[in-house]
Structure formats: structure tokens, C-alpha cells
Image (cartoon, helix red, strand yellow):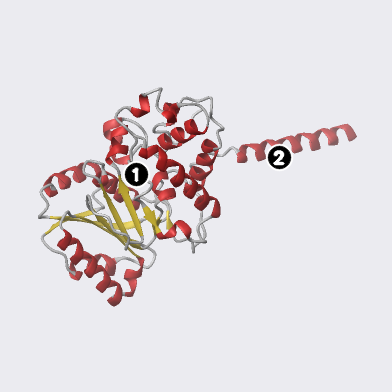
Amino acid sequence: MFPLIIGIVFVALVVIALFAVMRSRTSPTQAKSYPANLPVLDTGLKAIDLLAPLPRSGDVLISGDPGAGAKTIAGEMMYRLQNHPSLPYQTLCLLDAGSKDAEVMSAEFSETLPDSIQRRMVQSIATRDVMDLVQQSSRESRCAIVVFSQDERFIHLFRDAIREMRTEIPASSRLLAIIVTESMHWTTCDATVYFSQSVAESGVYPALDPQRSSSRLSDDPRVPAHRREIAARLRRLLADVVESLYPDALGDPQWMFNQRGANKAQGQAFRFLSQLLFTAEPYTGKKAACIAADDAAIWFRQILDGQFEQLPPQSFLYQNKLPH
């Protein structure tokens, strides 16, 4: 009888140990819960979440060099906001009817975005254009208004309308206002996401410019320290990579960031900023993913620490997790 009891206890301990191992190997891309006071809106886009973290409410500028993909990523952002796994936003897209590509964008968004995202062509912006969305939102929901325009006056009127609405309507404190344009850059927004043509031409997309992108949350103590630390390290090290880019640099074995050692780790990290998009799935046939920012921070630290010296830099392009 005694040996039987010993055997049962042994089996139970083995099962408990195996369960603990299985839990430790749970996929790092699963959604995680964060404190209610965490100010960051995790989009699942690792480059943005680490280098230009967005606020849950406030003003955001998405801009970039012509042809660098600012509008495409803004469309992806709308998709992710509307379908956010834990913090969905009621999203409204306003297209400046005076923009020469407004009709083209409207047609593209009709194909890539769900009907639940409202889209309107507008000639001008006033508080009443956005007030309904805010007033109709429930207590639990959040609002995002995304404006596409190349006209500085149009953008100025939109920002004035948002300021006025935040003053008059208490519910608008939960509003996320996003301005999407090209070639404009200013630092008065809570976050600025800027895209670089040279990065886009290298084949890394989203083509985030780590030096021209910024966020007031980068130094916010409410953001986990390891995320802030790796973001600062990434921004510093990637500046050299972006500075050295030239046509076909990523495929050139003589490019310094394809060499062994620390330079190679920087080249790997640069490629790992690339990510597949949900809105592009019908065209690429490749599955996109929401990548937890905490996991992305850990992965980038491992890359920069040289833990993957044996892997070719190209193996880090468009990966939803670390390559093996």
C-alpha cells in the first residue's frame, strides 16, 4: 500500500511540473491584461508600440515622406482600433474632399476596412462634424477620429474643432484624434509617427523613422521600465542603421550591418521592425498578428544582446515571433 501511495504522489508531482513548463511556454503573442491606469494604447505593431507609443486618448500625427506608406499604415491602424481585442474604438474616418487622392483612398478603404468603420468625405471641418460620434459613444467605449488631408488649413480647423469639443463635452476626454498627412512634422501632438522613404525602399515596412518619431509616453513612469529602456536603446542603435541605408543595402553582404558582431545584431533588429498587416492579408496571403509590446521588448533585447548571431539577418524580416 505504501509504495502505491508513493507512486501516486510521484505521478502528481510530475504532472504539476509538466503543467508549470507548459504554462511557461505559452505563446508570447497572446493578449495580456494591463493596469487600468496604463496610458498606452498597444496597437500590436511592434515598431510603433515601442518607438512611438500611442496614448489611449489625445492627439496623434501620422506623417512621413511621400511614398513611405503613412496612409497605408493609418488604414491598418483604423482596422486595429476598431477590432482591438481589449480596448476597441468606435472609429470614424474623415477624408478631405479637396485632396487629389481622396476618391482613391475611399475606394481602397472600402476594400480593406470593415463597414463598421464609418467613412465620410467632407469639404471642411467643424465641431459638429465629429460631435455625434462622441455623444453616441457609451461609457465603456472609446472614440477615434482619423482625418486624412494634405491641406494645412483643413488640419488646423480640425485641431481647433477637437480642442473646442474637449472643452464642451466631458465624454470627449476619451477621444483619440489622429491626423494623417505627408511631409508635415510637428511636436505638439502627444505622439508623432513618421515614416521614412529610405526605410521603405529598403524593404522594411512599416517604414518607421526612429529619430523623427516620438511620444510623450516614452519617458512616462507608468509605462513598464523594460519597455522604455529597450525603446531608448533601439532608437539610439537604429539611428546608425537608417543613416547608412542605400539601395539594396539589406541584400549586400558588404553592408556593415550584415557583418558579424554588434553590427549584425543591429541589422537583425532593424529587419525585425517589419510586420505583416491585417489589411494586406487578401493580397499577400500571409497572416498578420497583434504582437504584445512586452514580448516585443524582450525579443528586441535578445536580438541586440547578440543571442542570434548564428541566424542570417534576412530571417528576421516580417516575422510575428523570433525565428529559429
| Pick the front one: 244 or 258 | 244
Seen in the image, is 319 located left or right of residue 261?
Answer: left
Is 305 located above or below residue 93 in the figure? Answer: above
Q: Residues within 10 Å of mark 1 (few under 14, many from 20)?
A: many
| Pick the front one: 212 or 160 | 212
Q: Secondary structure at mark 2?
A: helix
Quadrant of residue 246 within the rendered picture? top left
Three-letter amino acid code at the position of disc 2: Ile
Q: Please give the name of the residue rendered at 17% of the width and 46% of the height, measured from the top-left corner.
A: 105
Seen in the image, is 99 located left or right of residue 181?
Answer: left
Residue that numbered label 1 is attached to: 208
Question: Mark 1 and mark 2: span between their CA atoms?
Answer: 44 Å
Q: Position of residue 180 (x, y in %)?
A: 24, 53
Q: Position of residue 207 (x, y in %)?
A: 32, 41
Q: Position of residue 267 (x, y in %)?
A: 44, 33
Seen in the image, is 3 located left or right of residue 88?
Answer: right
